[in-house]
Image (cartoon, rainbow, N blue to C red):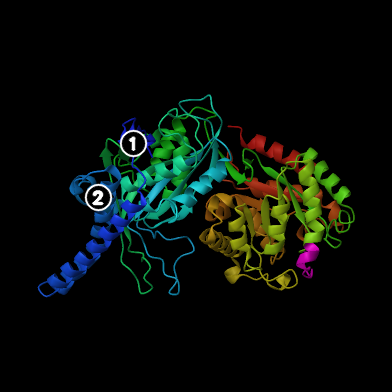
Amino acid sequence: VPRGTHHHPSSAGNPMPRVSVLSKSEKAILHYSRARHQLFCVIFLCLLNSTMSASTCRRFATLTPRLMRFGMSNMARQSALGGPVPFFRHNKQLFGYRAPMNPSRYRSDLVVPRGGASPENPIKQMDYRVFLAVGSNLGDRFQNIAVALDLLCDSSFDESSYLDSRLVRTSFLYSTAPMYLTDQPQFMNGAVEIETNLEPHALLRRLKKVEEHLGRDLVHGQRNGPRPVDLDILFYDENHHAEGTSGAPTRHSQHTPIIVDDPDLIIPHPTMQERSFVMDPLKEVAGGEYIHPKLDESVGDIWDKLKSSAPDGEDSVQILPLQRDRAITFHETIVMGILNVTPDSFSDGGKWNNSVDIAVEHALQMETEGASIIDIGGESTRPGALEIAIQEQIQRTVPVIKMLRQKSDIPISIDTRHADVARAAIEAGADIVNDVSGGTFDPKMLETVAELRVPMILMHMRGTPESMQSMTKYDNDDVCGAVAGSLIERSCAAEKVGVHRWQQVLDPGIGFAKDNDGNLRLLKHTATSIRQKLQGIPLLLGTSRKGFIGRITGESEASERDFGSVASVVCALSLGSPTPSNLGCNILRVHNVKGTKQAALVMDAISKVD
């Protein structure tokens, strides 16, 4: 890489030296120097051991790995820049970074993947917790962001700049209008929390290498202009933790924010507080209580000020990213049309399974009537239904998906509990996996969806369709708490294997292992306690033509329950909502698209009136 200068968004236009890629011979010298340095540290500790107390020895043993890393990074700089670099001047995290006056005010929650650690699989906490802003407005935006995060944490990418790093959690993703330079495409923006052993300047260099690898011109590119990927450091915390018996960080973990004010790097990011597209996702990953170490204000307070002063129409819109740079945009309530290509579904079984042409024609009709997603299923999950062979499901659904994809670009979800069916459907052109078991039925499902890198709908269910109606009793009759808690567990399990929060939709599973009272309680509290417990993850409601509506209305024919179905979802989304101007991100899974779409449009319009 030619030496020169480039700019970083956090640096307020100040140039920094570019770092050359190490040659093979330079790497060999570096590896030899590293081994020699490690040996020196071991000998040094052995010599001191006879004169130091046990507690002092432990402190030196804890410090030694950090000194070794800093020594190695300093040698790497010398090799890359072609000359000696003063150790104390560059390793400011030991000798120059400033910490806030009162670190006890900052978050002390665990920084581990949301699935947590276990004695069998302990998760070691790294030196630093970092919050990054991520964005893109060129090419396949979500793919660019996802690949960038993969490369950042991939030890095989640019080995000379790598130290252990991992993605902990993500925000949701937002579609946002460009800022400063407005004549450019819409951005896809989000934020992530990572853990890393890279010190701030080393992480900055690695972020620049990732951006450059994905096509960003760091030398001649227009400042604030279009870019395939943008990775900015927002906050940087040093981890201090006590380890439990499993080796995992305990609840006594502490984080001390790091402040950097150098020509080439400023932390915290100097202009984040004026950018809604940064603060919206940052609040989701850092938490509203996180204190900005320079402004001495919480992220929540900064967000509130920004929202109160923002002109109308400047809000970003939450999205669900899809393949080929498409997305479900939650600027309105989303209607999902049901297409069961089964002979035995409770409402429309046998209507669409005999002809691929007829099934696709019905899907296109639902799209015309206002559906934003078509949900295709090849296995009935009505109460008492038996499991259908995987190959039979594939034969029922894949031909329909292929033909529909040839005729329309509408998002398609595959309704299945089986990983092999999900894979076949996605490869045929589907975009979303809708699993009524929440990934519990097939142990391969979550890993398969993570590998396919598509969104997933996780539904609450107990047992199987054969047994679920015998499992409708919940501890203390708290069906809402039990369902919300179970869904969060499934969300964490999915995130742990790589189905991140910005790819998730949660479904309380109306009619699945719930009695009449349980269904009604879930619907009554959807807009309040349930949405709050589910932490803003988009919700899907599937009440269409279900038995509890028939029991309430006395309507025995499932196809005649559309009016009651519409009432159930409109009330659920509106009743008791603490913020009627914001109904949240919702998907309604229905048979009657036209009627539901009309009701949703009216509901959305009423909710937006002051």
In front of the other: 381 or 473: 381
Please identify the quadrant where the N terminus is shown.
top left
Report the number of discs: 2
Q: Where is residue 283 in the image (x, y as percent from the top left)?
A: 44, 45
Q: Give the range drawn in magenta.
A: 382-393
Residue picked out by circle 1: 3
Q: From the viewer's perspective, tell me whether residue 276 is left or right of residue 371.
A: left
Q: Do the residues labelled 1 and 2 touch (CB within 8 Å)?
A: no
Residue 52 found in image quarter = bottom left
Q: From the viewer's perspective, tell me whether residue 553 is left or right of residue 305.
A: right
Q: Where is residue 537 in the image (x, y as percent from the top left)?
A: 56, 51
| Extreme-left residue of the structure | 51
Task: Look at the numbered disc 1 and give the secondary structure of its residue.
Answer: loop
Vertical order, 479 against 181 (above or below): below
Residue picked out by circle 2: 93
Vertical order, 171 against 415 (above or below): above
Question: Residue at image x 60%, y 48%?
Answer: 576
Residue type indicated by callout 1 = Arg
Task: Look at the numbered disc 2 and give the secondary structure of its residue.
Answer: helix
In front of the other: 488 or 423: 423
In front of the other: 87 or 99: 87
Crowding around mark 1 (Cα neighbors within 10 Å: few <14, some 14 to 19, many 20+) is few
